[in-house]
Image (spheres, grey):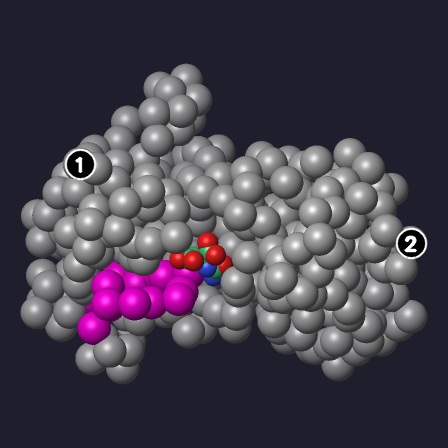
């Protein structure tokens, strides 16, 4: 595993191994406290982030490594006009592994072509977010005990939400997943995903506009924020931003063991009253993000604790 740009860069077996290693780290974090001693992670974030950047940094620190980097394009030489390729080449001389977030689709892939250290895509535009997908898969495994035979509702901005795109691709390799895509017509998943994932693999999916109509069927609901920064027109954003608000009333018809996921940040799409419902998993999900990134960093750097 040289770079991680697209969730499909990982085989199902590799995902299983990462989830297994993350599980071992959760059980016994002390065993992994020094495995990355003297290694450096560079976090190159050209776009804002809280969880992804800080969970990458916490992951490397908890492995005994060090971190360096920047958290906005303004504070890097990108503001002087430096190309992503040049920035990556320079950083590769200082660090052992790079995590990069960028507003332009494909930027982390470009970076990966110029360096001989592993590059991890930490979100590229509306395209992919493979480490959020690993976080989501770990959460589903922990909550449900399996990654197959599940009915999953994806709700909200399915057009611009990169976490949705990546998770749909990754799940397409597991058996018995029923996809229910809940969005306003304007925010349906992109055509390329319908063609390249669902149609190509003959996977059925349903598109609906009201979450109430399908709530009782779901094992998992994956809520998302309307991606304001990717809209061309503020008026469209304002019209669509509160399309879905999950509240206790809507949950009345849901299964007792529904798992509510959200990559966060939340704006209005889940009422804070839901936070104390045992079905709410999103803060737990954010915690799992650190552990799966620990497993990923170890694997990409080729390090292990004694008996792993
Ligand atoms: C997501 C992202 O950046 O795409 N956040 C995250 O990484 N946890 C989701 C979002 O911004 O809505």
- Where on the picture, by quarter, is residue 25? bottom right
Residue in front for this viewpoint, 145 or 5: 5
Please report the bounds of the magenta region as a residue range.
256-271
Residue in front for this viewpoint, 250 or 81: 81
Residue 292, above or below 300? below
Which residue position is annotated with label 2?
A: 93
Q: Quadrant of ligand 1?
A: bottom left
Residue 109, above or below 147? above
Q: Position of residue 16 (x, y in %)?
A: 61, 48
Which residue position is annotated with label 1?
A: 185
Horizontal side of residue 181 vs 292, given as left or right? left
Q: Residue furthest front?
A: 80
Q: Position of residue 6 (x, y in %)?
A: 59, 38
Q: Secondary structure at mark 2?
A: loop
Q: Position of residue 135 (x, y in %)?
A: 52, 58
Horizontal side of residue 190 vs 1, given as left or right? left
Residue 128 magenta: no
């Amino acid at each position: 595993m040289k770079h991680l740009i697209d969730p499909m860069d990982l085989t199902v077996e590799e995902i299983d191994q990462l989830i297994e290693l993350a599980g071992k780290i959760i059980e016994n974090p002390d065993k992994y406290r020094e495995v990355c001693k003297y290694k450096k992670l560079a976090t190159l974030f050209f776009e804002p982030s809280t969880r992804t950047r800080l969970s990458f940094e916490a992951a490397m620190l908890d492995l005994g490594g060090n971190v360096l980097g920047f958290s906005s394009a303004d504070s890097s030489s990108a503001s002087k006009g430096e190309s992503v390729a040049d920035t990556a080449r320079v950083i590769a001389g200082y660090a052992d592994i790079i995590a990069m977030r960028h507003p332009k689709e494909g930027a982390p892939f470009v970076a990966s072509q110029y360096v001989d250290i592993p590059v991890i895509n930490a979100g590229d535009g509306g395209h992919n977010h493979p480490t959020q997908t690993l976080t989501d898969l770990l959460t589903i495994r922990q909550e449900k005990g399996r990654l197959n035979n599940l009915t999953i509702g994806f709700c909200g901005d399915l057009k611009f939400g990169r976490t949705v795109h990546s998770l749909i691709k990754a799940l397409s390799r597991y058996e018995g997943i029923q996809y229910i895509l809940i969005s306003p017509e304007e925010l349906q998943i992109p055509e390329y995903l319908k063609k390249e994932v669902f149609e190509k693999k003959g996977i059925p999916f349903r598109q609906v506009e009201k979450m109430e109509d399908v709530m009782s069927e779901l094992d998992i609901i994956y809520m998302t924020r309307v991606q304001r920064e990717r809209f061309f027109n503020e008026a469209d954003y304002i019209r669509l931003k509160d399309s879905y608000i999950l509240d206790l009333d809507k949950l009345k018809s849901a299964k007792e063991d529904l798992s509510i996921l959200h990559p966060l940040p939340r704006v209005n799409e889940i009422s804070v009253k839901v936070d104390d419902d045992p079905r709410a998993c999103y803060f737990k999900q954010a915690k799992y993000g650190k552990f799966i990134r620990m497993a990923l960093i170890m694997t990409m750097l080729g390090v292990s604790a004694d008996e792993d």
